[in-house]
Image (spheres, rainbow, N blue to C red):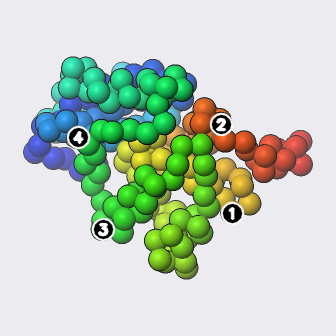
Amino acid sequence: MTRSSKRMYYSVMDSPCGPLLGIVDEDGAVVRIDFSGGRSSRQMEEDLADEVLHCLRDEERTADLERQLREYFAGQRRSFDLPLAPRGTDFQLEVWSQLREIPFGETISYGTLATSLGRPNASRAVGAANGANPIPIIVPCHRVIGADGSLTGFGGGLAAKRTLLELEGVRLEAERQRTLDLG
């Protein structure tokens, strides 16, 4: 994320995937959710300060985001009704919009996602846009998997992707079989 003159607010919350840093803009729209990637909450805040101008810690302004994420992790929420303000190219925004159409507890392949966008030969471009998604979980990029059912890259790490999919009741048979074959 580049520096912005618009005021932003953040909070850090615990989750089954480790600490999450959520950012909303001054209008209350979700701008970003970051996984810790092994960083402490404090390190996440320090990294944010280096990256985003005018970002203040404010649990009150991020309360709706935190509440809906907690409900999701508790199995009490299947979709989110928060305003979103992702920043990206027109193509990325198109991919991220399509990601929101993937139902809770279901997965699709990158190829299927590309085809649903009318671009059947754009699997790699779709994968790149998926990887650039600034609002994971709410824009459920974790629901996109390899054509063979295997877990593939995820900004929060494959363990977090597995946790999110299992929380949604997705059976990861291909991934389990691949693990068994390697074992």
- The residue at which mark 4 appears reads as 29
Q: Using a 10 Å C-alpha cutoff, classify the residue at mark 3 as few (fewer than 14 neighbours), some (14 to 19) or many (20 or more).
A: few
Element at label 1: loop
Residue flagged by tag 3: what amino acid is it? Answer: Asp
| Image quarter hosting the C terminus | top right
Q: Earlier in the sequence, mark 3 or mark 2?
A: 3
Residue flagged by tag 2: what amino acid is it? Answer: Gly
Residue 169 is labelled as 2
Element at label 2: loop
- The residue at which mark 1 appears reads as 147
Q: Can you tell which of label 4 and label 2 is closer to the viewer?
A: 2
Q: Using a 10 Å C-alpha cutoff, classify the residue at mark 2 as few (fewer than 14 neighbours), some (14 to 19) or many (20 or more).
A: few
Element at label 4: loop
Residue drawn at x 30%, y 38% as measured from the top left: 82
Residue drawn at x 43%, y 23% as measured from the top left: 70
- The residue at which mark 3 appears reads as 90
